[in-house]
Image: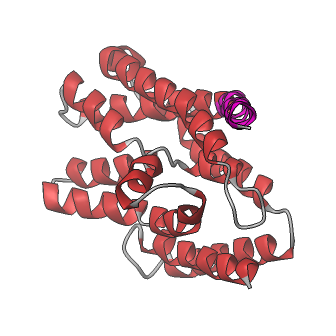
Protein backbone atom coordinates (compact mmCIF):
# COMPACT_ATOMS: atom_id res chain seq x y z
CA UNK A 1 0.00 0.00 0.00
CA UNK A 2 2.77 2.43 0.95
CA UNK A 3 4.71 1.59 -2.22
CA UNK A 4 1.66 2.23 -4.38
CA UNK A 5 1.06 5.53 -2.61
CA UNK A 6 4.67 6.59 -3.13
CA UNK A 7 4.51 5.66 -6.82
CA UNK A 8 1.31 7.68 -7.27
CA UNK A 9 2.95 10.67 -5.59
CA UNK A 10 6.05 10.34 -7.77
CA UNK A 11 3.94 10.07 -10.93
CA UNK A 12 2.00 13.20 -9.94
CA UNK A 13 5.29 15.00 -9.33
CA UNK A 14 6.66 13.99 -12.74
CA UNK A 15 3.44 15.07 -14.41
CA UNK A 16 3.70 18.40 -12.61
CA UNK A 17 7.24 18.90 -13.92
CA UNK A 18 6.03 18.29 -17.48
CA UNK A 19 3.13 20.71 -17.03
CA UNK A 20 5.39 23.32 -15.47
CA UNK A 21 7.94 23.43 -18.30
CA UNK A 22 5.95 25.78 -20.61
CA UNK A 23 5.33 28.12 -17.69
CA UNK A 24 9.03 27.89 -16.91
CA UNK A 25 9.81 29.39 -20.31
CA UNK A 26 7.48 32.29 -19.55
CA UNK A 27 9.03 32.67 -16.12
CA UNK A 28 12.52 32.80 -17.60
CA UNK A 29 11.55 35.75 -19.80
CA UNK A 30 9.75 37.57 -16.99
CA UNK A 31 12.62 37.13 -14.57
CA UNK A 32 15.11 38.19 -17.22
CA UNK A 33 13.08 41.34 -17.81
CA UNK A 34 12.95 42.05 -14.07
CA UNK A 35 16.70 41.74 -13.65
CA UNK A 36 17.38 44.01 -16.62
CA UNK A 37 15.13 46.69 -15.12
CA UNK A 38 16.55 46.13 -11.64
CA UNK A 39 20.08 46.66 -12.90
CA UNK A 40 18.98 49.86 -14.65
CA UNK A 41 17.46 50.99 -11.33
CA UNK A 42 20.79 50.55 -9.56
CA UNK A 43 20.62 46.99 -8.23
CA UNK A 44 23.85 45.01 -8.22
CA UNK A 45 23.94 41.61 -9.95
CA UNK A 46 23.75 39.87 -6.58
CA UNK A 47 20.84 42.03 -5.40
CA UNK A 48 18.81 41.44 -8.57
CA UNK A 49 19.34 37.67 -8.47
CA UNK A 50 18.75 37.41 -4.72
CA UNK A 51 15.49 39.37 -5.00
CA UNK A 52 14.23 37.03 -7.72
CA UNK A 53 15.22 33.90 -5.78
CA UNK A 54 13.73 35.00 -2.47
CA UNK A 55 10.55 36.73 -3.64
CA UNK A 56 9.83 34.44 -6.63
CA UNK A 57 6.75 36.43 -7.58
CA UNK A 58 6.85 38.58 -10.68
CA UNK A 59 3.99 40.93 -9.88
CA UNK A 60 5.39 41.71 -6.42
CA UNK A 61 8.91 42.18 -7.76
CA UNK A 62 7.84 44.55 -10.52
CA UNK A 63 5.57 46.49 -8.15
CA UNK A 64 8.34 46.97 -5.61
CA UNK A 65 10.81 47.88 -8.35
CA UNK A 66 8.47 50.50 -9.80
CA UNK A 67 8.27 52.19 -6.39
CA UNK A 68 12.06 52.20 -6.02
CA UNK A 69 12.52 53.50 -9.57
CA UNK A 70 10.44 56.62 -8.85
CA UNK A 71 12.34 57.32 -5.64
CA UNK A 72 10.18 55.52 -3.08
CA UNK A 73 11.69 54.01 0.04
CA UNK A 74 12.02 50.38 1.08
CA UNK A 75 8.86 50.42 3.28
CA UNK A 76 6.79 51.70 0.35
CA UNK A 77 8.32 49.10 -1.97
CA UNK A 78 7.59 46.30 0.51
CA UNK A 79 4.02 47.53 0.90
CA UNK A 80 3.48 47.55 -2.87
CA UNK A 81 4.92 44.06 -3.22
CA UNK A 82 2.85 42.74 -0.33
CA UNK A 83 -0.35 44.12 -1.82
CA UNK A 84 0.39 42.42 -5.12
CA UNK A 85 1.03 39.13 -3.32
CA UNK A 86 -2.04 39.40 -1.11
CA UNK A 87 -3.93 37.07 -3.47
CA UNK A 88 -1.86 34.22 -2.04
CA UNK A 89 -3.81 34.58 1.20
CA UNK A 90 -6.98 33.39 -0.51
CA UNK A 91 -5.05 30.75 -2.44
CA UNK A 92 -3.43 29.47 0.75
CA UNK A 93 -6.76 29.23 2.58
CA UNK A 94 -8.15 27.13 -0.27
CA UNK A 95 -5.04 24.94 -0.41
CA UNK A 96 -4.50 24.35 3.33
CA UNK A 97 -6.90 21.37 3.76
CA UNK A 98 -5.00 19.46 1.05
CA UNK A 99 -1.64 19.79 2.83
CA UNK A 100 -0.72 17.32 5.60
CA UNK A 101 1.04 18.09 8.86
CA UNK A 102 0.98 20.90 11.37
CA UNK A 103 1.03 24.62 10.76
CA UNK A 104 4.77 24.92 10.18
CA UNK A 105 4.87 21.96 7.79
CA UNK A 106 1.93 23.31 5.82
CA UNK A 107 3.55 26.75 5.74
CA UNK A 108 6.76 25.22 4.37
CA UNK A 109 4.84 23.34 1.68
CA UNK A 110 2.95 26.51 0.84
CA UNK A 111 6.20 28.14 -0.31
CA UNK A 112 5.84 26.05 -3.47
CA UNK A 113 2.68 27.89 -4.49
CA UNK A 114 2.80 30.06 -7.58
CA UNK A 115 -0.17 31.03 -9.72
CA UNK A 116 0.28 28.30 -12.31
CA UNK A 117 1.07 25.49 -9.85
CA UNK A 118 -1.98 26.38 -7.76
CA UNK A 119 -4.24 26.38 -10.81
CA UNK A 120 -2.87 23.16 -12.30
CA UNK A 121 -2.98 21.30 -8.97
CA UNK A 122 -6.63 22.25 -8.46
CA UNK A 123 -8.71 19.10 -8.93
CA UNK A 124 -11.87 21.14 -9.47
CA UNK A 125 -13.63 19.77 -6.39
CA UNK A 126 -12.06 22.05 -3.79
CA UNK A 127 -9.02 19.80 -3.26
CA UNK A 128 -5.46 20.02 -4.60
CA UNK A 129 -2.83 17.49 -5.67
CA UNK A 130 0.14 18.63 -3.61
CA UNK A 131 2.69 16.51 -5.44
CA UNK A 132 1.57 17.86 -8.79
CA UNK A 133 1.84 21.34 -7.28
CA UNK A 134 5.40 20.69 -6.12
CA UNK A 135 6.39 19.25 -9.49
CA UNK A 136 4.91 22.17 -11.40
CA UNK A 137 6.84 24.68 -9.33
CA UNK A 138 10.29 23.05 -9.60
CA UNK A 139 11.05 23.86 -13.28
CA UNK A 140 9.58 27.33 -12.83
CA UNK A 141 11.86 28.14 -9.92
CA UNK A 142 14.89 26.87 -11.83
CA UNK A 143 14.12 28.93 -14.95
CA UNK A 144 13.12 31.93 -12.83
CA UNK A 145 16.55 31.89 -11.21
CA UNK A 146 18.33 31.36 -14.54
CA UNK A 147 16.40 34.24 -16.09
CA UNK A 148 17.41 36.50 -13.22
CA UNK A 149 21.07 35.56 -13.63
CA UNK A 150 21.06 36.10 -17.41
CA UNK A 151 19.20 39.40 -17.13
CA UNK A 152 21.45 40.71 -14.39
CA UNK A 153 24.66 39.82 -16.23
CA UNK A 154 23.61 40.66 -19.80
CA UNK A 155 21.23 43.51 -19.03
CA UNK A 156 23.33 46.17 -20.73
CA UNK A 157 23.52 44.13 -23.92
CA UNK A 158 19.76 43.52 -23.98
CA UNK A 159 18.87 47.19 -23.57
CA UNK A 160 15.21 48.25 -23.44
CA UNK A 161 13.10 45.13 -22.80
CA UNK A 162 9.93 46.85 -24.07
CA UNK A 163 11.17 46.56 -27.64
CA UNK A 164 11.27 42.77 -27.19
CA UNK A 165 7.55 42.67 -26.43
CA UNK A 166 8.06 41.16 -22.98
CA UNK A 167 5.34 43.42 -21.57
CA UNK A 168 2.77 41.21 -23.35
CA UNK A 169 3.83 38.09 -21.46
CA UNK A 170 1.99 38.82 -18.21
CA UNK A 171 -1.54 39.18 -19.60
CA UNK A 172 -1.10 36.14 -21.85
CA UNK A 173 0.28 34.14 -18.91
CA UNK A 174 -2.64 34.89 -16.60
CA UNK A 175 -5.19 34.47 -19.39
CA UNK A 176 -3.87 30.95 -20.02
CA UNK A 177 -4.30 30.15 -16.32
CA UNK A 178 -7.81 31.53 -16.32
CA UNK A 179 -8.90 29.47 -19.31
CA UNK A 180 -7.78 26.22 -17.66
CA UNK A 181 -9.90 27.04 -14.60
CA UNK A 182 -13.22 27.71 -16.37
CA UNK A 183 -14.45 24.17 -15.75
CA UNK A 184 -17.91 24.78 -14.34
CA UNK A 185 -20.52 27.43 -13.60
CA UNK A 186 -19.00 28.37 -10.24
CA UNK A 187 -15.54 28.86 -11.76
CA UNK A 188 -16.92 31.03 -14.54
CA UNK A 189 -18.97 33.08 -12.07
CA UNK A 190 -15.89 33.64 -9.87
CA UNK A 191 -13.73 34.60 -12.87
CA UNK A 192 -16.21 37.11 -14.25
CA UNK A 193 -17.02 38.61 -10.84
CA UNK A 194 -13.37 38.94 -9.84
CA UNK A 195 -12.45 40.48 -13.19
CA UNK A 196 -15.23 43.04 -13.09
CA UNK A 197 -14.42 43.98 -9.50
CA UNK A 198 -10.74 44.46 -10.33
CA UNK A 199 -11.56 46.59 -13.38
CA UNK A 200 -13.89 48.77 -11.33
CA UNK A 201 -11.23 49.39 -8.68
CA UNK A 202 -8.25 50.07 -10.97
CA UNK A 203 -9.07 53.79 -11.55
CA UNK A 204 -9.82 54.57 -7.90
CA UNK A 205 -7.48 52.46 -5.74
CA UNK A 206 -3.72 52.01 -5.20
CA UNK A 207 -1.84 49.29 -7.13
CA UNK A 208 -2.43 45.85 -5.66
CA UNK A 209 -5.80 46.60 -4.09
CA UNK A 210 -7.82 45.50 -7.17
CA UNK A 211 -5.98 42.17 -7.17
CA UNK A 212 -6.54 41.73 -3.43
CA UNK A 213 -10.24 42.52 -3.71
CA UNK A 214 -10.69 40.22 -6.69
CA UNK A 215 -8.91 37.39 -4.90
CA UNK A 216 -11.49 37.48 -2.10
CA UNK A 217 -14.09 36.44 -4.65
CA UNK A 218 -12.28 33.11 -4.95
CA UNK A 219 -13.07 32.44 -1.30
CA UNK A 220 -16.76 32.69 -2.15
CA UNK A 221 -16.19 30.07 -4.82
CA UNK A 222 -14.45 27.79 -2.33
CA UNK A 223 -17.32 28.15 0.16
CA UNK A 224 -19.92 27.42 -2.52
CA UNK A 225 -18.06 24.26 -3.56
CA UNK A 226 -17.81 23.02 0.01
CA UNK A 227 -21.53 23.45 0.73
Residue lying furthest front: 1
* Viewer-side residue, 136 vs 8: 8
Specify the principal SS of the magenta part: helix
Instruction: State the residue at coordinates (60%, 27%).
Output: 25
Report whether residue 164 is seen: no
Query: Residue 86, percent across and down?
Result: 41, 66
215 relative position to 37: left or right: right
Question: What segment is highlighted magenta in the picture?
Answer: 2-20
152 relative position to 12: left or right: left
Quadrant position of the C terminus in the picture: bottom right
Q: Is residue 166 above or below residue 123?
A: above
Query: Residue 7, percent across and down?
Result: 72, 29
Report whether residue 110 is seen: yes
Instruction: State the residue at coordinates (65%, 29%).
Output: 17
Q: Indicate whether residue 54 is drawn in magenta.
A: no
* Viewer-side residue, 91 vs 152: 91
* Viewer-side residue, 128 vs 119: 128
Q: Quadrant of residue 139?
A: top right
* Viewer-side residue, 170 vs 184: 184
Query: Residue 212, percent across and down?
Result: 47, 72
Quadrant position of the N terminus in the picture: top right
Amino acid sequence: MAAAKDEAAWEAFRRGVRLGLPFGVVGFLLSLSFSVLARQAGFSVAQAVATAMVVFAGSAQFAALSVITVGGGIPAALTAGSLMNARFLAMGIALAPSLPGGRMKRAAQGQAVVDSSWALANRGDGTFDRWLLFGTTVPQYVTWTLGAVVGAILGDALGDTDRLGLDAIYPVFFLSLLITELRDTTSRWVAVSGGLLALALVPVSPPGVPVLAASTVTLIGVVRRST
